[in-house]
Image (spheres, rainbow, N blue to C red):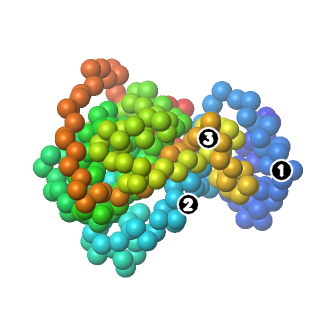
Amino acid sequence: MSADTSSLYQRLRRAYPPVRRMLTWPIIRHVRFMMMRRLRPLRNGALPYGTAVVRYYWADFLERHRADIKGRGLEIGETTTLRRYGGQAITQADALDIAAHSPEVKIVADLSRADHAPANTYDCFIHQFSITVIYDVEAALYHSIRMLKPGGILLINFASVDYYLYRGLDMGTGAPLYMYRMFMPLEVINMLYDLGLTEVDFQLTSYGNLLSRMAFLLNLSAEELTEAELAAVDYGQPLLLCVRIVKPANWSAPKPVYRDPHWLPPGPPSHLSPVTGHYGDEYQ
């Protein structure tokens, strides 16, 4: 598909809702996937018109565990997800971030160094799309569990595939973010065992397959895949790992020895753009 044809496709999709529906027809979607032979994501990384594939999977996971989102809740950065899925079951919604960039941020902390954050406080903690930008993952998980009440629920996701922010990304939340790792189930499960959890304390759900991984990296939306394509799980091709953790009543894991990165990329980081989203300015 030529650049001119691609541009026409985008204009039609934005302008005419009936055309947008038509573009989900099987024959049109097959033509759409002819655009995969490319060196850059679609629209140069600008946000997809629909739902990002990883967001689709995370929404499915949260919907399955909506009953866990209640009482006093904690979320990274803001409280939107707590309020959306918890509704009136949430009695207090707090956010945690490295800077007090909004009134919702009640705990100002680097989660991997959150010794001053209160223990045994929260009924639920939604920790979404942030663990990849934390270097000391074990410490961050330790504090995530420590802040929960006994029996409290941690809902957390781990990216198996993502765009690598090789210069870092400044989201205006206090400090640039750097992506340190992507995760496989074997690594996640062993980290949880190291933190004093057992197989009865957590459940890991794997989402994704080869097609959904490619679609996500190419910047296709979830709406451009069928439900069957999205629902197919290939355990050898995970895209997103979602974990539900229940804090045991007698949890007493020792605090991990803290680790700091030895090197960070030189030069200025990318900046978050309302147009390009998490891709920053790399393709602009």
Q: Which residue is mark 1?
A: 28
The residue lying toward the viewer, choosing from 184 and 89, is 184
Secondary structure at badge 2 equals helix
Q: Are marks 3 and 2 in contact (CB under 8 Å)?
A: no
Using the image, determine if residue 66 lies above or below residue 181.
below
Measured from the top left, where is residue 71 in percent x and y?
Answer: 30, 72
Residue 136 placement, left or right of 60 = left
Q: Closer to the observer: label 3 or label 1? A: 3
What is the x, y in percent for residue 215? 66, 42
- Please state which amino acid type lies under the numbered disc 2: Asp
Q: Residue 211 vs residue 281: left or right?
A: right
Q: Which residue is mark 2?
A: 60
Quarter occupied by the N terminus:
top right
What secondary structure is found at the residue carrying circle 3? loop
Q: Is residue 151 visible?
A: yes
The image quadrant of residue 80 is bottom left
Give the foreground label among 1 and 2.
Answer: 2
CA separation in Å, label 3 and label 2: 18 Å
Q: Earlier in the sequence, mark 3 or mark 2?
A: 2
Q: Which amino acid, by three-letter code, is at mark 3? A: Tyr
